Structures are given as structure tokens and as C-alpha cells.
Amino acid sequence: SAASIHEALLKITELYSGEEDQLLSTDFYLQPLREEGRLLVLNDNDEEIANADVPEWKESAADNFYSEVTAQLTAAIEASNTKGELERLAVWMPYSFVLVDEVRETITDLLLVDDDTLLVKKGLMAGLNEELNKFIEELLAD
């Protein structure tokens, strides 16, 4: 399932990569369909731009379904970002990846990119303070 979600994210980068003069304005809406065990990715025009099969969602408990989905999608986005795949997006900033429910109501922002700012749910930013402190110490030592 993680590989399937990653493939959907790669499909987005393929569709929305291009030159700077071809930038598009859109956000990406990730809609899990529990009964079907699928993830739909939609643009601002509600057009399906990618999908993924996630069979374990069919068996997920109702109480914490969106918490589980948020964790899975955040991990996939973190992995794509670590590999530099999201840097290829030719999309006007700010843009975001948003988790939506079955009626496309926003549940949470999974990723928000605004110029030099990248905000992702916990995980991607974990350890940032330690890295910054180490960088500053090394900079001051020189």
C-alpha cells in the first residue's frame, strides 16, 4: 500500500512538472475511499489526477480511520520530499496537499508549501531544532 500511495504521488509530479513559465495554480486533495480501498487525488477542479489501491483501508476501524490515513499519507509525503520528488512540482505557491473526507470537506493539511516554507505534519520536521542548533554552533565556531 505504501508503494501504491508513493506511485500516486509520483503521478502528480509527472503531471505537474514543467518549466517555470508553465506554472499552474492548484492544490492537491487526497480523498480516501474506505469502502473501495482506494485513494483518489484531485486537483482544484475536482478532476482525478491520480489514484492508488489501499486494500487495508477496507478493514480499518471506524473510530480512527482518518488518523491512520493521516499517518500513512504523511509518511508517503515525507518519503517523496526526502527523495526530492516534490521539488519537481511546477505549481504556484502557496500550494498544499489536503486530506478530505467523502464529501470533500477538509480534515487536515498534510503539506503546505509557501515559497521558502515547507510545513508537514510531524515527522518531516522532527529533529529540525537539533540540526539548526548544531549548524549554528558549527557556524559560530568558525
Image: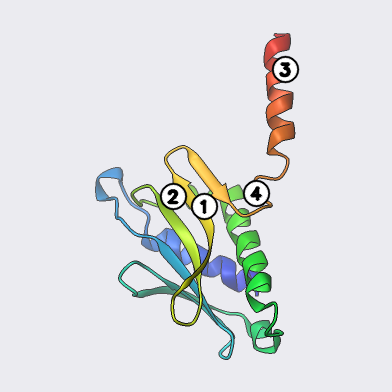
The residue wearing badge 1 is 85
> Disc 1 to disc 4, how far (Cα)?
14 Å
Q: Residue furthest top?
A: 142
Q: Is residue 102 visible?
A: yes
Question: Which amino acid lies under the numbered mark 4 shown in the image of this protein?
Answer: Leu
Q: Is residue 75 above or below residue 132?
A: below
- Give coordinates of residue 32: x percent, y percent: 54, 78
* Residue shown at 49% from the left, 52% from the top: 112
The residue wearing badge 2 is 88
- Give coordinates of residue 36: x percent, y percent: 56, 90
Question: Which amino acid lies under the numbered mark 1 shown in the image of this protein?
Answer: Glu
Q: Is residue 83 visible?
A: no
Q: Are marks 1 and 2 in contact (CB under 8 Å)?
A: yes
Question: Which amino acid lies under the numbered mark 2 shown in the image of this protein?
Answer: Arg
Which of the marked residues, 3 or 1, is nearer the chain's N terminus?
1
Label 2: state its secondary structure.
helix
> Disc 3 to disc 1, how far (Cα)?
29 Å
